[in-house]
Image (cartoon, rainbow, N blue to C red):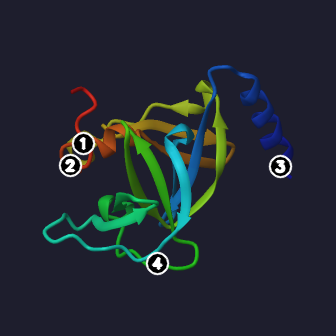
Amino acid sequence: MQTETLDAADDASVNDPASREFLAFKLGAEEYGIDILKVQEIRGYETVTRIANSPEFIKGVVNLRGIIVPIVDMRIKFNLGEPSYDQFTVVIILNIAGRVVGMVVDSVSDVTTLSPSQIRPAPEMGAAFNTDYLIGLGTLDERMLILVDIDKLMSSDEMGLIDSLAA
């Protein structure tokens, strides 16, 4: 079975000081990854309070221990069809540039350690697809993670959630 190869790859990347850990999550059929250091906590999906005139991808806000947290539905944000909420749907609570933001995903898979050799640059897609928010593609045997630069995505002008990191 391929498990032995995966374990060996994990061992090699754990010993590499340049390795990075990513939280893997699913949106539709694809698997994505974000820097684990940006994750504050993972919670089950709960009803949000809708805010009038907010973009469709901003589901609303929740009160998280006294902090009002905007919740972004990544399936809507990435145009991946109609979201459905079930027992696997989770909210990943992120801490980005000192702001707390939640993102709704279909499910969380695991934490994966990738060495620099396992991260490939994102392919150029031209004007049809914006790759500004991608770190690259993480490869683990037959598995591929789309690595998202969550800082850039959440602080983008179109999101309007966090002041630009350059400021």
**Mark earlier in primary sequence (2, 3):** 3
Figure label count: 4
Which residue type does callout 4 highlight? Tyr
**Mark earlier in primary sequence (2, 4):** 4
Residue sitting at x 13%, y 68%? 53
Q: Left of 6 or right of it: where is 21?
A: left
Give neighbour class at mark 2: few <14, some 14-19, many 20+ (Cα, 10 Å).
few
Location of residue 15 in the rendering, given as x and y in whole percent from the top left corner: 76, 23
Question: Do tag 2 and tag 4 residues touch (Cβ < 8 Å)?
Answer: no
Q: Nearer the viewer, mark 3 or mark 4?
A: 4
Location of residue 137 in the rendering, given as x and y in whole percent from the top left corner: 50, 39
Quadrant, the C terminus? top left
CA gap, disc 1 and disc 2: 7 Å
Which residue type does callout 2 highlight? Gly
Which of the 4 quarters of the picture holds residue 127? Answer: top left
Question: Do tag 3 and tag 1 residues touch (Cβ < 8 Å)?
Answer: no
CA gap, disc 3 and disc 1: 39 Å
Which residue type does callout 3 highlight? Thr
Q: Which residue is mark 4?
A: 85
Which of the 4 quarters of the picture holds residue 121? Answer: top left
Residue sitting at x 83%, y 49%? 3
Mark identifier at residue 160: 2
Which residue type does callout 1 highlight? Ser
